[in-house]
Image (spheres, rainbow, N blue to C red):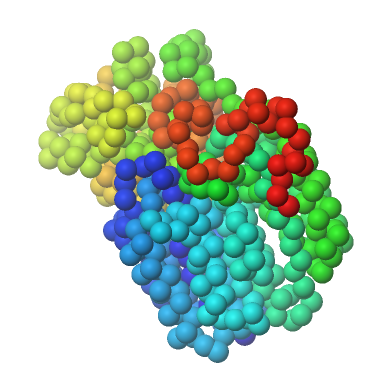
């Protein structure tokens, strides 16, 4: 049996002023043909799982393209056309084929398509016809749409945020493909979109209420006849009609069971809605807690400037407060500022350097901050991930400098990235467990690696593109009413009356 695979992965924050062209994909990861296998084989990633799944079942796997860009603004039409073209050409070139297993994100928006995954899946479907099965894995932040659900035979989303089950979902996708090919699975799907759009912090699957919803889904997955269930938390900043929480139940040829499970999960999500509201801590209050604490590290999450959600990663709000408070023993991971990296590198290790740091991308994340410090290290910014997210894969921060300013180490990088692995620090000679506090630009993903070493985790109430204060963003295309944007309206409205299913 011969399967074709391909990946186009982007979480699009339409409010970001960074255009997502092919260069943005090249900067993060863009691989063609066999390069995909070489890069991912042996890694605990979704594509690593697809590769291993094919080996387990004796399937031949034909790779086409792997394209991922750090979350940013709309994908250019040209970039999408080029990348999708590579997948479609790959399918044509490999024909005759038995199936297609894709890995997509679910929250991609291009200039011409609000729902790029629906577009990709429908284009692949048009090419392969109805008789060739099409399966895809998705991120937990996917905004599922009817077009996606109708175009693929089975869709499988991550169950975790931080995303630590990508590999398992990849293996699962190939297992599902095998059952589609041998005729033992007749997928019957029920799709529900309760009017809810939780902020990222509330989507953390290690904490109530998201954990409750996932538990319920897993209990149902154990029922006879249920094949797979996806509860996707959605990504608000894609700002189109299908943004938000969605539920997709796939049974083996059992319409009633699919509908019952999907209705129950929808009702459960709705009943928990008020518990999805989040209350971040004011920055100065959090810094006082660091000062008062005898043990570290305390992890401070700058949730407003999370590059994993499309924020610029060069915000200075927290750094400014830390320097004003003269707090020592901290590390910042990371501040993306290629200009400052260049200046630090030019000054050289062991020298003092003065830079105007950060605040250069937009007006939402604080102004550039003039700092003077000691250049401790300059590196190529590459490391192999050892923690639970993407274990074994290579991470590339671009050229990176560590500059000691006051009592804190600033990790300044060329590329924007979320700190999801402790090797980020250790590859730079910084031992995170010895720090009094660690500032991470991340909403939730930092937890997988940082919670085991953290004395305490505090979500900071910082301004920015990924702030949980969703009502302030002026979204224009999200379906309304939706919780929590229209809290009062929904408080007096019946869910069933609003649900379109
Ligand atoms: Zn995600």
Picture residue at 60% right of the left edge, 81% below the top: 129
Picture residue at 44% right of the left edge, 18% below the top: 283
Q: Is residue 117 above or below residue 91?
A: above
Q: Position of residue 370 (x, y in %)?
A: 20, 23
Considering every residue shown, the one lying at the far left of the view is 346
Residue 24 seen in the current view: yes
Q: Is residue 430 above or below residue 165?
A: above
Quarter in which the N terminus is drawn: bottom right
Picture residue at 70% right of the left edge, 49% below the top: 500
Can you tell which quarter of the image residue 319 is in? top left
**Left or right of residue 412, residue 184 in this image:** right
Q: Is residue 336 above or below residue 49?
A: above
State the residue in front, 472 or 53: 472
**Left or right of residue 315, residue 114 in this image:** right
Picture residue at 66% right of the left edge, 82% below the top: 131
State the residue in front, 272 or 174: 272
State the residue in front, 415 or 227: 227
**Left or right of residue 434, residue 211 in this image:** right
Q: Position of residue 332 (x, y in %)?
A: 36, 30
């Amino acid at each position: 049996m011969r399967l074709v695979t391909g990946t186009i992965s982007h979480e699009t924050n339409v409010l970001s002023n960074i255009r997502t062209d092919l260069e943005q994909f090249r900067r993060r990861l863009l691989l063609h043909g066999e390069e995909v296998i070489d890069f991912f084989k042996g890694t605990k990633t979704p594509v690593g799982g697809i590769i291993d799944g094919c080996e387990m079942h004796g399937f031949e796997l034909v790779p086409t393209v792997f394209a991922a860009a750090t979350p940013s603004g709309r994908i250019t039409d040209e970039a999408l056309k080029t990348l999708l073209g590579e997948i479609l050409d790959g399918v044509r070139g490999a024909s005759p084929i038995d199936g297609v297993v894709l890995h997509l994100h679910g929250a991609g928006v291009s200039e011409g398509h609000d729902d790029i995954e629906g577009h990709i899946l429908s284009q692949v479907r048009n090419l392969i016809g109805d008789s060739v099965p099409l399966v895809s894995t998705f991120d937990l932040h996917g905004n599922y749409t009817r077009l996606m659900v109708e175009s693929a035979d089975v869709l499988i989303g991550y169950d975790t945020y931080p995303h630590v089950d990508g590999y398992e979902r990849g293996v699962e996708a190939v297992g599902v493909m095998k059952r589609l090919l041998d005729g033992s699975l007749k997928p019957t799907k029920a799709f529900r979109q309760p009017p809810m759009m939780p902020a990222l912090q509330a989507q953390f699957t290690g904490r109530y209420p998201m954990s409750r919803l996932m538990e319920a889904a897993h209990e149902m997955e154990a029922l006879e006849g249920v094949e797979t269930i996806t509860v996707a938390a959605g990504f608000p900043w894609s700002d189109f009609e299908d943004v938000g929480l969605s539920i997709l139940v796939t049974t083996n040829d059992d319409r009633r069971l699919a509908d019952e499970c999907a209705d129950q999960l929808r009702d459960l999500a709705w009943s928990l809605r008020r518990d999805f509201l989040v209350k971040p801590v004011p920055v100065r209050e959090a810094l006082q807690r660091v000062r008062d604490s005898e043990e570290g590290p305390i992890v401070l999450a700058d949730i407003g400037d999370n590059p994993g959600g499309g924020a610029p990663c060069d915000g200075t709000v927290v750094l400014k407060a830390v320097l004003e408070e003269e707090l020592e023993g901290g590390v910042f991971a990371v501040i993306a500022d290629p200009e400052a990296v260049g200046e630090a590198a030019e000054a050289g290790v062991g020298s003092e350097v003065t830079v105007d740091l950060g605040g250069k991308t937009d007006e939402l994340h604080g102004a550039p901050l003039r700092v003077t410090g000691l250049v401790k290290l300059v590196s190529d910014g590459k490391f192999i991930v050892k923690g639970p997210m993407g274990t074994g894969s290579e991470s590339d921060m671009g050229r990176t400098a560590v500059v000691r300013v006051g009592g804190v180490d600033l990790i300044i990088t060329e590329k924007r990235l979320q700190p999801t692995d402790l090797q980020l620090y250790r590859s730079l000679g910084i031992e995170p467990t010895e720090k009094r506090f660690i500032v991470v630009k991340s909403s939730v993903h930092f937890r997988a690696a940082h919670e085991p070493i953290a004395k305490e985790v505090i979500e900071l109430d910082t301004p920015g593109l990924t702030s949980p204060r969703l009502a302030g963003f002026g979204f224009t295309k999200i379906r309304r009413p939706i919780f929590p944007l229209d809290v009062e309206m929904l408080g007096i409205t019946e869910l069933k009356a609003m649900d379109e299913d």
